[in-house]
Amino acid sequence: MPSMLKIKKFNWTEGASPLLYFNIYKYIGPTILGKQADVQLIYKSGKSVRIYGDEGEVFSEAKKRLSKKTNIRERERLTKNFEKSWVDATVYGYSEYKKLSGNKNPIATLDPLKNLKNMPERKVLEKLQESVSSIEEIKAMNDLITDNFYKQINPAKLIDSKLSEKGWDRKDLADEMQKLGEEESQKQSTTYTHLSGERAVSRDVAIRYGKILSCDPVDLMFAKKTTVVWGKVNTKKVVETYKSFVPGEIYPYTTSDKDMERVIVPRDIWKKNIKAVKIDARGTIFDQHVGFYYYSNTKDEACMNKLCVVGATVHPVAIDPDYTETNYYLGLYENDKGTSNLINADPFVSEKNKYILKDFEPNFISPVVCIINPQTIVDETAKQSVLPESEYRKEEMLVSELHKVREQLKIAKQAAERAKQSVKQTEETQKEADRVQKEITRTQAVANKIMQDVKDMQERLLDFELEQPIPNVIMDEDKVA
């Protein structure tokens, strides 16, 4: 939502008075307004100024006021302390912020917990016990965020949703996939792994599932892109809430994030800064239609005579000209010879309500890029708790990382198995080497014994002497013959 900056003064008197100290509150607003802040500047005379609204604008406005302090050394000291306190400031839930600050004089609403670090343990426990309700609210907010923003939405859930829509169960889809042609058919077990989330759904498989389920394959792989309706507008009559909103002025319709409406954003126009407002004007041609626009702090030059969301600074309290608010409107932007006007978009509006604003200075102008009736694009996926786009990307990255880890685990298991086999083979080789070594040792011992026996025999032969020499025998050849 576009930012909102308000400035309110308490006990204000004319005349210089030194700025003594400040309070800083950061909080989450009752609707999705982005980050909000409330800075309270307190002067020596007892007067004070509250600057609250968009965090960035509050910071800039507070720094601008601090820079007006005439004492240079004090100005530098105060600015340095302010910047450090800004960074360290606690972000409160809206209800807790209201309890701590409210709309009272800032002097009477100093943060009762800001000095906990310097308190004895007993005092700290007492302070914490006093704030049990706010702690419970923080816990409830945490549960809400966990439930709505971190609940995984993956293709398995989206396919299951389509099956429920058709009255099918998982077996029906598995059977239909098995009946496809030879090149497109798929085992039942593979379909079940897709539906259980164990295996990612590829583009080609999503196309086949989409053909069977008669839906866009994209809707089986990615949840619908959605955004919240941050405000509503009545083009026909005044709306009374905490104040009066004129026809064409955008107003908050709930104080609870839980009750905020979500609408499907057409994929062709979706961007990170897409915003949505809803026209709630019974009996008009635009009733229940949602206008989408891109949030910007600039004034789009191509907005002439187009339906736009504009922001304008107003002075709602005539007796306090220093108190300003930034209000938001939906209408046809007109620039007549340098004069900006905003015309009611309802063609059947009465003449007195034809002009929403005349001769005003817009803070920003954002053209409406699309206006549709969300009931025409609602399908089963709209009934789910849908994540912001940033969380889709995180989930896709996590799924991708999961597959990478699984592949790495598979490779690691294979390497471990190979290492195990290698160790087993090494052990067997070592055993064989030990056996061979023993055989070699035994054979060497036998060989050594044989060599020793031969040596002993040779020594005995050398020492042997014949007592009588062997006689020479003369042979008679004739007799022998």
Image (cartoon, rainbow, N blue to C red):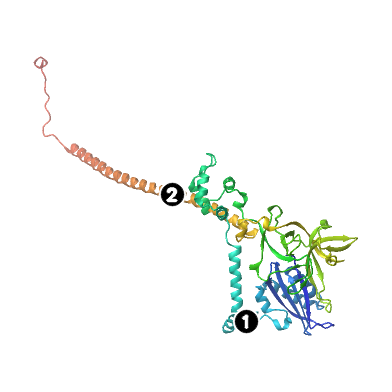
Query: In this rendering, does residue 464 appear at all?
Result: yes
Q: Residues within 10 Å of mark 1 (few under 14, many from 20)?
A: few
Q: Report which residue position mark 1 lands on.
A: 118
Q: Report which residue position mark 2 lands on.
A: 417
Against 462, residue 247 (above or below) is below
Q: Secondary structure at mark 1?
A: helix
Q: Number of labelled discs?
A: 2
User: Which amino acid type is marked by label 1?
Assistant: Asn
Q: Which quadrant of the view contains residue 280? A: bottom right
Query: In this rendering, does residue 203 appear at all?
Result: no
Dots 1 and 2: beta carbons under 8 Å?
Answer: no
* Residue 359, x across and y down, in percent: 87, 66
Of residues 94 and 181, the one drawn nearer to the viewer in this rendering: 181
| Residue at (56% x, 49% y) in the render | 201
* Residue 113, x across and y down, in percent: 64, 80
Query: Alpha carbon of mark 1 to alpha carbon of mark 2: how far?
Result: 60 Å
* Residue 63, x across and y down, in percent: 77, 72
Q: Residues within 10 Å of mark 2 (few under 14, many from 20)?
A: few
| Residue at (69% x, 67% y) in the render | 32
Against 186, residue 11 (above or below) is below
Outermost residue, right side:
337
* Dot placed on the residue nearer the N-terminal end, 1 or 2: 1
